[in-house]
Structures are given as C-alpha cells and as structure tokens.
Amino acid sequence: MFNNRWTILALLALVRTSMGFQFQSVASLDSFLIEDLDLSYGQLGTLIGMFMLPGAFLALPGGFMTRLVGDKRVSAFGLTIMAVGAVIMGVGGSYSVELSGRLVAGIGAVLFNVVVVKMVTDWFADREIVTALGVVLGSWPAGIALGLLTQNGLAETTSWQAVMFLTAAMSIVGALLITMLYRVAPVAEPAQERATQIFSLSAREFWLATVAGLTWATFNMGFTSFFSFAPGALVDRGISPVEATALVSIGVWITVFSVPLGGFLTERLGRPYSATVLFSLMSGLALALFPYVPFALLLTILFGLTIGPPPGAITAMPSRIASRDNLGPLLGVFFTWLYAGNFIGPVVAGFSRDLTSSAAAPLIVGAFFFITVPLFVGIFLRFQKVREQGFA
C-alpha cells in the first residue's frame, strides 16, 4: 500500500499538518501569553517568528544531512525535536523559557520541512510535481486552520499549556507514522552513494536557489501576517477573539483546497510564473483592504482563493534548477532564505503595531511582502533565461 506515490503523498501531508498546528499555537494563544507573561506585541511577534529562526542556520546543513543519514531518519528526528520544544513551552512560565522552547521546536521543524519537500520531489519529480507539492503544502494551512478553530477554545476550557502538550503529542504520532509507513522512492539513491558529492552546488545553482528562496520567503511572510495579525484587527473592531479567529480560519481553510487545486491548474495551464505574479498581487490587495473594508468575510474568502496558485509553482523552482543529485543541498539553500524571512516577517509586523498603535499596521506590512514576490520571480526568470509567452 505505501509503495504507491499518492499514498505516500497523503501520509506526508497528514504528518506535515502537525507542523502548521504547532506553529499557529502562539498566535492562537496571544491573549493568554500577553496576560500571563506580560508581553508586548513585538515580543509576541518575536515568539511567533522564533519557530522559523533556526531554519536560517540549519536548513542548509539539514539538506546535507539527508544525503548522509537518509530522509526517513532526518524527518522522524525532526518531529521528535518538535515535540521536545513543545513540552518545554508547556512547562515553562517565563518569556525566556518560552523562547527557548520555541527555538527547539523550530530546529525540529526545519529538519522535517526540508526533507519532506525532498521526499515529495523524489516521488514526483518526473511528473505532476507542482500538483504534488501543492497537496503537501496545503497541509501547512490545514494545521494552521485547525489551530485557529480549536486552540483558543481549548485554552479557555483547560489551559494554554495543555495546547502546547497537544502539539507535542501530534509531533510524536507523526514521527511514529513516518518510521513505520514511509518508503524511500525507487529513484532515490542510497545515502552512502550520495555522500561523496555533498558540496557539489555550482555558483549558478546557489544563486538561483537563493532567488527562489526569497520568492517563497516573501510570499510566506505575507501569509503569516494574515493569520497571525488579522484576528487582532477584527478584535479592534469589537469582535470577540473566538469569533475573530474563526472568521480568519475560514480563509485559511480555503487555502487547504485552493493550494493543491491551484497547483493542479497552473501545471495544466503551463503558466506557473504568470499565475504566481498575478495571484500574489491579488493576495496583497486583499490583505491591504482587510482592516478598512467592512466586508471581512468576503475579503477572507478572496484571500484564501488567491493564495492557492503560487505555492506549488514557487516550491517547484528548485526542481527546475539542479539535478536530482543536488536536490537536498539545493533545498537547504532554498529553505535557509524562507526561514530567515519567516523569522523577520512576524517581528517586523509585530513591532509595526507597537510603533503605530494600529491593528492595521501588521496587515499593511504583510501586503508589502506580497507585492515583492513579482520582483523575485522576474529576477529568477531573468537569470534562468526562461520566458513564458506573454510574460516578459
């Protein structure tokens, strides 16, 4: 059963949901953490972004690790470290301890995330890669949406610490599923054969991976601004925190379906870069209007729909750059920039609210992130010397 690539894809998508669920936990519990730990919004943004910080330093070594010890071991180890970090946050009672636990969880997340994209690419590199990546990427907003719907309510009925322990349990279950059920793709080479070529990236491959990584980083920085700070903008209008998170979660739930469907459609139409540019600009516009337009539900739905097409196309960029031999290290470069950006994004957005005392400021910052995506797409195409008809 688990030698079928679509079954493998379903397994990886299911397990990756736990990563989105854990990432969302801090934003969902913002009111509890601000009250109990006496945090500013800048500190809250730092705590959110700390989950991503390790990737700026460990994504590249993580890519190399896949060649040395194998995909299954790296992914299971990463999920276990995520659980350890969540437990530290659950037992901690100070901002410094919460930061430490979030950092540990982020270390595990980066190891898992780099290798899971490689796993999908190994199984689908020669066919339907954009669609497959769209499916597995949809698991991230699925976990976030699940967190938006459940975490605040669970904290109210039990405690915010219980939410942290729940994220730990989900990571452990994921590690067990990967260990017991995942099978290495038939096309993947044994780790010992790949280890002799560890540092084989050319300057061109490194540069293109960097530009692709910046594209993915800025897109995610905009998306993170939405689900982390849009509930606060609604609360500022007088909506209850539970209702605000539920409303925002609608947009995130839509991305669970719009991302894989968007990947499928852009692959069939053969215009992934044009779609990335168009829909990134539309997402930025929806986010910029969100604090000011009374039709919050309509904008949430529009945002969820426009998020769909770009992710599969952007994360397929590394597979267009290098040979299969270099995919692990190249994904390490790609995710290094993603994680650096995803640490900086929430911090900048959080401090923008502190500086302006406006709940709209983080969303305006997020809209700016979205409109920079076309710039990086253009740079990528310029240096890869790829041109689509109608895109120049």
Image (tube, rainbow, N blue to C red):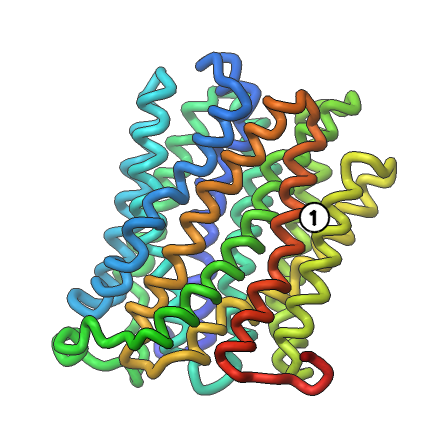
Place residue 271 in its image quadrant: bottom right
Relative horizontal placement of residue 298, taking residue 184 as reference (left or right) = right
Place residue 390 in its image quadrant: bottom right
Is residue 173 at least partly visible in the picture?
A: no
The quadrant in which the N terminus is found is bottom left
Relative horizontal placement of residue 123, taking residue 357 as reference (left or right) = left
Spot occupied by residue 167 in the image (x, y as percentages of width and height): 41, 38
* Residue denoted by label 1: 251
Q: Between residues 70 and 312, which one lies in front from this camera angle?
A: 312
* Residue under the image location 68 percent in, 47 percent down: 367
Is residue 117 at least partly visible in the picture?
A: yes
Spot occupied by residue 208 in the image (x, y as percentages of width and height): 43, 71
From what the image shows, is residue 117 above or below residue 221? below
From what the image shows, is residue 70 above or below residue 272? above
Circle 1 SS class? helix
* Residue under the image location 67 percent in, 25 percent down: 241
Q: Between residues 4 and 204, which one lies in front from this camera angle?
A: 204
Spot occupied by residue 334 in the image (x, y as percentages of width and height): 40, 63
**Crowding at mark 1 (Cα within 10 Å: few <14, some 14-19, many 20+):** many
Residue at the right extreme, as displayed: 294
The quadrant in which the C terminus is found is bottom right
From what the image shows, is residue 229 above or below residue 138? above
Type of the residue with mark 1:
Gly
* Residue under the image location 36 percent in, 75 percent down: 205
Q: Between residues 127 and 363, which one lies in front from this camera angle?
A: 363
Spot occupied by residue 94 in the image (x, y as percentages of width and height): 36, 16
* Residue under the image location 85 percent in, 38 percent down: 293
